[in-house]
């Protein structure tokens, strides 16, 4: 019988942090900066093209020392080695966790069950590159001999969010003659809207699913096949208009896709970590193999930074420790990720799966219920739009919302003053959040007294700033890897398995029970609770 976990909260470093929290919880960032004017040059770290300024956090040198001690105490160093060595650290599924092998250079050696997986990784990358070049050059033709002009990735979760986010992020580098779309939702509207203006004879579907059993993806893939065959009227067309990305050759074959046209990956790649695998095929077609490889090199640079840099200068470790400080000691519930770059419009949605599916866990390695907060709710949209929507609450609301601001020194699309205005806003927000405006300052501006409380900014609202020179494929890879490893560090300290996702299973199983009840001709006997029964009955009466 599982008990309550106390291994972490009873540890000396945790207890020391609890005591320390009582001493510093009310210290203002104004004071911290006044007492240490060099803080903004010191509390920074650099790696793999990213500059992390974590000085506007409610931490002192002592906080950092204690958090680093906590990381050491958690056995983080050994866990990092275990991951990179291919140990089966995803112990609830008995799997290695080796997304780092997907971006290892050709000559590297990474063993899984005694076998070096790097040559296979590069064989698949080469196969993807050859295929992408054929599509991009027009050598790959549809069934009627027409050139492919539209590529649609069908997938969901990790088989959608990564490529969809990265396609947006790297659109600047993409072939603008290709239309690239992503269909994920089982809601037919997604498929219908994505295909309504396209010609099947010019459309290629990439069916992406690790398991190739996911209800949403298989339903969309079958609808796509009907859509193609309705127009091309020959089963032989499937081979020219469908390719698959999967670990499951048997199911791919069953669907009718030739395994020659299947791009493989492996069970040691978690769905939410799979963008740099064959799951990135739609992205590679869009941006070309060279840019895709640049992205992998950026990932790898961050992997090496993470593996070899002392914790006190290690970007993922620092980001993880600061986040954990708010989660567990300040009881913060969320993390806002705010990219000041329009191309990163889907970055926060991508991070939601990465972080929340990884660290949304409530039992520890021993199966005991944890007595502390684990992963935060991740959210956010690109600046400056959020400033005119929800930033009010971040500045003056009653909740503590740590934020990550992400920006670039150069824009890919120079236009007048736009970029300076964008970045001025980003820097201004972190300054305003940290330092606020006191009542006296507000009053001294001559505003009416009754407005003073309303126009006072408490400040002391913590932020990280992540700055890079320019949004390149390599920088995107490095940014994603930073967050991947951050999630891993936090999971290690919280003693949770960041690599399984059992929490998504119950809803899937219940849906499978309800589907036949909805589709039955005669009213079935419903044995759910009274709410679910009534909803199903009402739906059955009202559906077409
Ligand atoms: O339901 C959750 C999940 O298993 C994710 O972890 C995964 O990324 C997604 O579904 C899609 O799975 P698949 O790639 O096997 O279709």
Image (cartoon, rainbow, N blue to C red):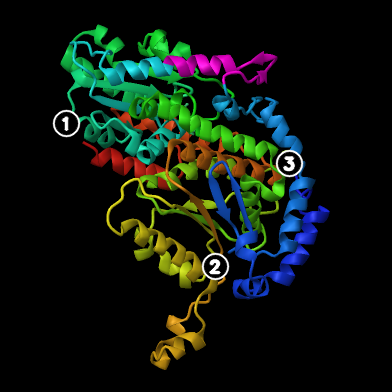
Nearer the observer: mark 3 or 1; the answer is 3
Position above or below: 148 against 516? above
Question: Label for residue 197?
Answer: 1
Q: Position of residue 326 (x, y in %)?
A: 62, 59
Give the SS element for disc 3. helix
Task: Classify the position of the N terminus by image quarter.
Answer: top right
Query: Is any part of residue 227 visible from this angle?
Result: no
Which numbered disc flags the more N-terminal residue, 3 or 2? 3
Position above or below: 437 against 389? below
**Looking at the image, which residue is at 74% across and 48% down?**
71
Q: Which residue is mark 2?
A: 461
Quarter residue 128 falls in: top left
Which numbered disc flags the more N-terminal residue, 3 or 1? 3
Q: Which residue is mark 3?
A: 76
Q: Is residue 439 left or right of residue 520?
A: right
Q: Position of residue 466 (x, y in %)?
A: 52, 52
Position above or below: 414 against 438? above
Nearer to me, 90 or 460: 460
* Magenta stretch in the rendered image: 106-127
Cβ–Cβ under 8 Å for marks 3 and 2 = no
């Amino acid at each position: 019988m599982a008990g309550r976990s106390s291994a972490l909260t009873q540890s000396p470093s945790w207890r020391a942090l609890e005591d320390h929290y009582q001493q510093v919880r009310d210290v203002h960032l104004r004071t911290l900066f006044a007492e240490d004017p060099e803080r903004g040059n010191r509390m920074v770290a650099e790696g793999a093209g990213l500059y992390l300024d974590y000085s506007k956090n409610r931490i002192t040198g002592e906080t950092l020392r204690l958090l680093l001690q906590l990381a050491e105490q958690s056995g983080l160093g050994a866990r990092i080695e275990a991951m990179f060595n291919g140990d089966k650290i995803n112990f609830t599924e008995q799997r290695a966790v080796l997304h780092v092998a997907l971006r290892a250079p050709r000559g590297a050696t990474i063993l899984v069950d005694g076998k070096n997986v790097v040559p296979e990784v590069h064989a698949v990358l080469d196969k993807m590159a050859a295929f992408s070049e054929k599509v991009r050059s027009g050598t790959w033709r549809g069934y009627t001999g027409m050139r492919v002009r539209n590529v649609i990735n069908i997938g969901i979760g990790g088989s959608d969010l990564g490529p969809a986010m990265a396609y947006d992020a790297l659109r600047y580098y993409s072939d603008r003659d290709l239309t690239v779309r992503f269909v994920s939702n089982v809601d037919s509207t997604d498929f219908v809207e994505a295909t309504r203006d396209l010609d099947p004879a010019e459309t290629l579907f990439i069916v992406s699913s690790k398991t190739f059993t996911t209800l949403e993806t298989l339903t969309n893939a079958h609808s796509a096949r009907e859509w193609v065959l309705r127009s091309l009227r020959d089963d032989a067309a499937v081979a020219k208009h469908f390719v698959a990305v999967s670990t499951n050759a048997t199911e791919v074959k069953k669907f009718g896709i030739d395994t020659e046209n299947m791009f493989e990956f492996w069970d040691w790649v978690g769905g939410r970590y799979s963008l740099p695998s064959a799951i990135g095929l739609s992205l590679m077609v869009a941006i070309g193999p060279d840019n895709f490889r640049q992205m992998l090199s950026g990932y790898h640079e961050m992997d090496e930074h993470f593996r070899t840099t002392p914790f006190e200068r290690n970007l993922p470790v620092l980001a993880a420790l600061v986040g954990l400080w708010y989660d567990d000691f300040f009881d913060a519930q969320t993390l806002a990720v705010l990219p000041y770059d329009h191309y990163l419009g889907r970055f926060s949605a991508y991070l939601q799966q990465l972080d929340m599916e990884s660290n949304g866990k409530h039992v520890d390695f021993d199966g005991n219920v944890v007595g502390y907060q684990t992963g935060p709710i991740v959210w956010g949209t690109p600046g400056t739009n959020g400033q005119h929507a929800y930033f009010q609450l971040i500045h003056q609301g009653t909740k503590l919302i740590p934020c990550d601001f992400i920006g670039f020194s150069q824009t890919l699309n120079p236009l007048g003053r736009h970029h300076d205005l964008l970045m001025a806003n980003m820097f201004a927000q972190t300054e305003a959040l940290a330092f606020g405006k006191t009542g006296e300052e507000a009053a001294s501006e001559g505003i009416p007294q009754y407005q003073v409380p309303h126009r006072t900014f408490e400040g002391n609202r913590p932020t990280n700033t992540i700055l890079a020179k320019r949004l390149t494929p390599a920088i995107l890879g490095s940014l994603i890897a930073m967050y991947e490893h951050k999630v891993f560090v936090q999971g290690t300290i919280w003693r949770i398995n960041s690599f399984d996702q059992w929490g998504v299973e119950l809803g899937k199983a219940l849906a499978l029970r309800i589907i036949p009840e909805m589709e039955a001709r005669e009213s079935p006997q419903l044995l759910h609770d009274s709410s679910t029964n009534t909803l199903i009955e009402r739906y059955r009466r009202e559906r077409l």
